[in-house]
Image: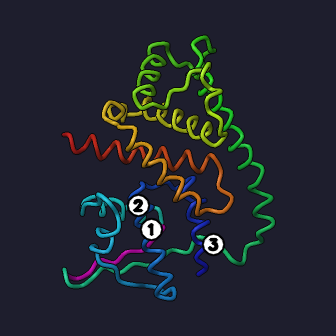
Amino acid sequence: MNYEKQLCAFYSTLDYKRVSAFAIAMYLILLNIAKITGWLSEFRVANSVFMSKIVNLSISTLQRARKELIDNDYIIYKKGKNQNDASKYSIVKLYNEQADEQAHEQADEQPNEQAVEHIIIKINNFFNYISNNEGDEFENIAIADKTHLVAILKRLEFYVPKNELHYIQNSKSLEDFKILCYAIKEIYFSSNRAYLDKATRNRVLQIYHNTNKYVAVKANYTVLDVLNYFIKSLEYEAEEVLRNEK
């Protein structure tokens, strides 16, 4: 198995077979162990290995993350017989070396470019709408919701009014602000809205930093890759925070 091809295939597959941030972290550990073993078809890994490498990972969270990977056909899992018998894992190969790569690229390139272009337009339009008091409507967002969103973004220090955009000199910084704002909007209109009252700037930025670190491993990653992974990570964080409060 080729590590880079498998990793690229994994991140591509995440576009339609999404899993939590914990599941992604767990998969990366498994993939690295498989590489170290010389790509054994089956290898043992104790739960303690994951617990020591993934921050805030509990046994119940580990089990849920593992089930996500199994259900989405990323791994094959065999439970150990007892506590002294570590579970066995196998990595499911996600790429086909015999496939005609050129034909695959030609078939997928145009739809992917259209999807990326579409989300960039939506991100820009929302950012312009939220930063402009006199902006046009965006996806039928009510005035009350816009007011709430602006308040949340101001508290998190992600809000940039239109007359202050010139203070952001770096184009990458502006892109980051736009992605952060759009992701917060997605959480606001989800079942995890209550999380935004508890979210902190530092924690959201940490999740965003981790997002960029993980996605950067993928060759030719796009804004769509970053946004999808970031939103999924925020959703998982929100579910964990809200679950712990019950």
Few, some or many residues within 10 Å of mark 2 (<14, 14–19, 20+): many
Dividing the picture into quadrants, the one containing residue 217 is bottom right
Q: Are marks 2 and 1 in contact (CB under 8 Å)?
A: yes
SS for dot 3: helix
Queried whether the magenta region covers residue 196, the answer comes back as: no
Which residue matches tag 2? Answer: 23
Horizontal and vertical percent for residue 103? 80, 65
Give the CA separation, mark 3 to mark 1: 15 Å
Query: Mark number for residue 183?
Result: none
Dividing the picture into quadrants, the one containing residue 95 is bottom right
Horizontal and vertical percent for residue 224? 62, 46
SS for dot 1: helix
Which residue matches tag 1? Answer: 27
The residue positioned 68% from the left and 43% from the top of the image is 115
Identified by mark 1, the residue type is: Tyr
Identified by mark 2, the residue type is: Ala
Queried whether the magenta region covers residue 77, the answer comes back as: yes
Which image quadrant: the N terminus?
bottom right
Q: Is residue 217 above or below residue 133?
A: below
Magenta-tinted stretch: 74-82
Q: Are marks 3 and 1 in contact (CB under 8 Å)?
A: no
Query: Mark number for residue 5?
Result: 3
Classify residue 197 as left or right of residue 189: left
The residue positioned 54% from the left and 57% from the top of the image is 14
Front-most of residues 19 and 71: 19
